[in-house]
């Protein structure tokens, strides 16, 4: 009788120190069956009853077999961090966030992203040598030679050759702007323009001289009248 009692106590002692199975969790002396993904423990098992599980609700989830009493809150994809919902939250899986249009991921996860940043904008005088993706930023390069870009082009454009179009270059091109062309002035037109300017200058000089003579004459007459008095 004493041997039987000792054997029972010994077996209980070993049971206390035995590890639970992979699909079990320990509560006191018991190894309880875990709840499946998407569910949490409502009541722990006893010597006579199994674990009672209930589904995750209200934007919560559990993605692994577990012995937890509460589900985890679903991740919120914050647009302020450049994120959008790529895959909505389910009872058995968390939300997966992706990047908004025009952003690239700074903190990638296995299936999504935790934080993103807006793609860089190229400056005037630069072109987009590599367009930004969801995982890489935009790469900008400088325009060289007789080429230009306002910063939004994927390749630098050649400056317009005004002379080849029969036009006159009014403003030379720069790395950030094209040449500005205007009508080609003929020699006769240029000469006429110069003559017009010269004529206007002469007329202005003559008008000034006449005004001066009139003013001098008025003063002389004024002095003469005072002398007669």
Image: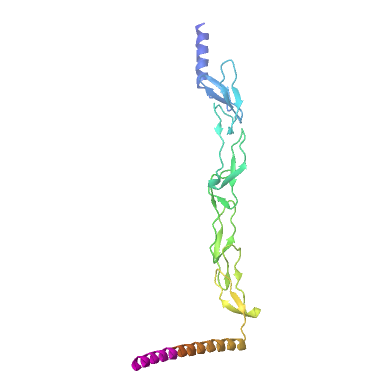
Q: Is residue 95 above or below residue 122?
A: above
Residue span colored magenta: 212-229
Q: Does residue 97 appear in this view?
A: yes
Count of numbered badges drawn on the protein: 0
Question: At x 51% / y 9%, what residue is drawn?
Answer: 5
Instruction: Locate residue 78: give its quadrant.
Output: top right
What is the x, y in percent for residue 138?
56, 57
- Colour style of the rendered protein structure: rainbow
What is the x, y in percent for residue 152?
59, 62
Which residue in the rendered view is the most extreme toward the top?
1
Instruction: Locate residue 143: give its quadrant.
Output: bottom right
Q: Is residue 167 above or below residue 136?
A: below
Instruction: Locate residue 58: give its quadrant.
Output: top right
What secondary structure characterizes most of the magenta part?
helix
Which residue in the rendered view is the most extreme toward the right?
165
Question: At x 60% / y 43%, what residue is drawn?
Answer: 85
Report the front residue among 110 and 4: 110
Report the front residue among 98 and 46: 98
Residue 219 covered by magenta stretch = yes
Q: Does residue 107 appear in this view?
A: no
Which residue in the rendered view is the most extreme toward the front?
229
- Rendered-image quadrant of the C terminus: bottom left
What is the x, y in percent for residue 195?
56, 89
Report the front residue among 83 and 135: 83
Q: Is residue 217 above or below residue 112?
A: below
Question: At x 50% / y 7%, what residue is drawn?
Answer: 2
Report the front residue among 108 and 58: 58
């Amino acid at each position: 009788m004493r041997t039987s009692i000792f054997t029972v106590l010994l077996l209980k002692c070993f049971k206390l120190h035995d590890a639970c199975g992979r699909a079990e969790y320990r509560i006191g002396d018991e190894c309880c069956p875990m709840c499946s993904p998407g569910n949490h423990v409502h009541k722990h098992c006893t010597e006579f009853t199994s674990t009672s599980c209930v589904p995750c609700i209200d934007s919560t989830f559990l993605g692994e077999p577990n012995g937890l009493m509460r589900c985890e809150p679903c991740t919120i994809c914050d647009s302020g961090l450049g994120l959008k919902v790529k895959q909505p939250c389910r009872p058995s899986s968390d939300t997966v966030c992706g990047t908004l249009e025009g952003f690239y991921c700074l903190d990638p996860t296995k299936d999504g992203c935790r934080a993103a940043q807006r793609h860089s904008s190229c400056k005037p005088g630069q072109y987009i040598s590599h367009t930004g993706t969801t995982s890489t930023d935009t790469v900008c390069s400088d325009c060289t030679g007789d080429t230009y870009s306002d910063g939004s082009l994927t390749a630098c454009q050649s400056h317009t050759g005004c002379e080849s179009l029969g036009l006159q270059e009014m403003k030379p091109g720069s790395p950030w702007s094209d040449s500005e062309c205007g009508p080609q002035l003929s020699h006769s037109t240029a000469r006429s323009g110069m003559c017009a300017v010269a004529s206007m200058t002469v007329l202005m000089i003559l008008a000034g001289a006449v005004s001066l003579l009139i003013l001098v004459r008025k003063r002389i007459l004024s002095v003469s009248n005072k002398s007669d008095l």
